Image: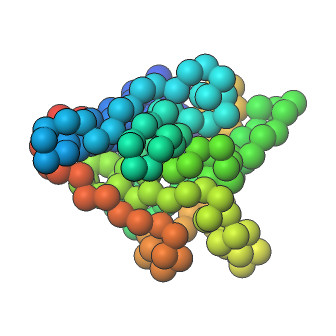
Amino acid sequence: MGTIHEFKDDYNIGLLGENLIKDYYHSRRTQDGNNLYIVRPAQKWEQQQGADFFVVNNELGTKYFEVKTDTQSKDTGNVALEIQIDYGDKKTIGCALKTFPDFLFYWIYPTTEVLYWNPQELNPFIIDWLLDNPRIVETKNKNFFSRSMLISVEDLKKTRVVRTLDIPLTIVEKNK
């Protein structure tokens, strides 16, 4: 089984990524200086379905975002797509296969690069990767363990479903 993680540490790293995305969208302005986006934390029922934020934009309407932060991707060149969570007596699908959030953001910590995609659009590729000798890693903490599939950043980008945000360095520095 994989590395044992402390929930508190993972949670704190996750908050850095959430703050990064929130700060990025709050920094986006119209030519008149007004906010382009309104970002609010997801309510409890939205969180239970996998969303971190509810986002409003006059042109895009409303969207739900989920944010993941990866501290190893910068060195490995891989992204860990969580495909299953095992609580012992209960198994659920991982965030990579959930379709409730409109977008999943994946910060390659501590770089300025954030990958993002619509989970529903990426799911067919995930199925292909699962069928083609997947590299599965398990991550364990006190209450559960998760299974993630390692996919190279290059392969993700080849799908043309995965896009990249280049976050201004000032926002990254604020959220390290």
Residue 36 vertical position relative to residue 135 in the rendered view, above or below: above
Q: Could you tell me residue 165's position as x and y percent? A: 31, 58
Is 172 left or right of 70, judged from the image as shown?
Answer: left
Residue occupying image coordinates x 50% and y 40%: 62
- Nearest the viewer among 3 and 120 is 120
Visible in this render: residue 167? yes
Visible in this render: residue 147? no
Q: Could you tell me residue 170's position as x and y percent? A: 12, 43
Question: Quadrant of the rendered structure where residue 121 is?
Answer: bottom right
Q: Could you tell me residue 131's position as x and y percent? A: 76, 74
Residue occupying image coordinates x 56% and y 49%: 102
Residue occupying image coordinates x 52% and y 70%: 161
Q: Could you tell me residue 41's position as x and y percent? A: 45, 25
Question: Quadrant of the rendered structure where residue 34 is?
Answer: top left
- Nearest the viewer among 151 and 2 is 151
Question: Quadrant of the rendered structure where residue 114 is?
Answer: bottom left
Residue occupying image coordinates x 71% and y 75%: 128
Is 167 left or right of 43, judged from the image as shown?
Answer: left
Is 123 left or right of 52, judged from the image as shown?
Answer: right
